[in-house]
Image (cartoon, grey):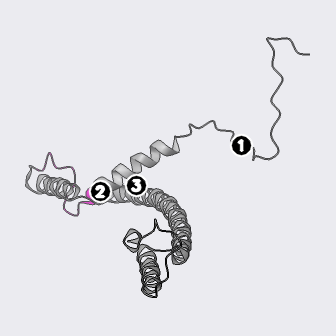
Amino acid sequence: MAPTGEQKPKRPRLDQPQRRSRLNLPQPDPDAFGRLSERFARFMGTGRFLVWMTMFIVVWVAWNVLAPPAVRFDQYPFIFLTLVLSLQASYAAPLILLAQNRQDDRDRVNMEQDRARASRTVADTEFLTLEVAALRQGLGEVATRDFLRSELQQLLKELDARNGDGQEPDDRRLTPSDLL
C-alpha cells in the first residue's frame, strides 16, 4: 500500500483520446467564448453598429484627405483602411457562424421539448376522449329524471285505471298524488 502522502500515478483511460499536444496552450472556456460571440453577432446586426462603422470610415477618409500631408497615415487608395476592414470581416464571420451554431443548438433542444410536449398533449387528449366516451356510454344506461318521471306517470295512469275498475289498490297508504 502506498504511503498517505504519495498517490498512485494516473493511468491513461483507454476510452478517451489522449492529448498529444506538446505545447501547453491555454484552453478557452467554450461557453464564455460562445456568449462573447453571440454578443458580438448581436451588436453587428444592429443599426448602431452600422452608424458607428460609417462614422469611423468617414472620419478615416476625411482625416486622410483633408488633414495636412504630414499627419496623413493612409493615402488615397486607403489600403490600410481596406486591411482594417478585411481583418474585422475575417474575425466577424467565424464569430457570427459560432453564434448561429449555438442558436441552432438551442432551437434543436426547444424543438425536441416541443415534440415531447405535443406527444404528451396528444396522449392526454386521447385519454380524455376515451373517458368522455365511457361517461357518455355510462350515462346512456343511467335512468334520467325525465325517464323516471315518465315511468311514474305511466304507473300512476295504471293505478288510476285500476281504481276506475272498482279494484282497490293493495296499499291504502299509497295514493296517486304521492307518486308525483
Residue 143 location in percent, x, y? Answer: 50, 74
Name the residue nearer the viewer: 128 or 137: 137
**Going from the N terminus, do you reach mark 3 or mark 1 first?**
1
CB-based contact (under 8 Å), mark 2 and mark 1: no
Is 62 positioned to the left or the right of 121 in the image?
Answer: left
Neighbourhood count class around disc 1 (C-alpha, 10 Å): few under 14, some 14–19, many 20 upward: few
Q: Secondary structure at mark 1?
A: loop
Identified by mark 1, the residue type is Arg
Quarter of the view holding residue 127: bottom right
Q: Are marks 3 and 2 in contact (CB under 8 Å)?
A: no
Residue 144: percent from left, percent from top: 45, 74
Instruction: Find the distance from the CA under tag 3 to the CA under tag 1.
Output: 27 Å
Name the amino acid, label 2.
Met
Does the segment drawn in magenta span residue 25?
A: no
Mark toward the start of the polypeptide (3 vs 2): 2
- Residue that mark 2 sits on: 44
* Residue 71 highlighted magenta (yes or no): yes
Q: Secondary structure at mark 2?
A: helix
**Which residue corresponds to the image point at 46% horizontal and 85% vertical from the top-left?**
166
- Examine the rendering and report whether any part of residue 98 can be seen: yes
Q: Is residue 84 visible?
A: no
Q: State which tag comes first along the sequence, 2 or 1.
A: 1
Residue numbers of the magenta segment: 69-81
Mark 3–mark 1 contact, CB under 8 Å? no
Q: Secondary structure at mark 3?
A: helix
- Quick one: label 2, few (<14), some, or many (20+) residues within 10 Å? some
Q: Which residue is mark 1?
A: 19
Name the disc covering residue 91, or none: 3
Q: How far separated are the C-alphas under marks 2 and 1?
A: 36 Å
| Location of residue 90 by image quarter | bottom left
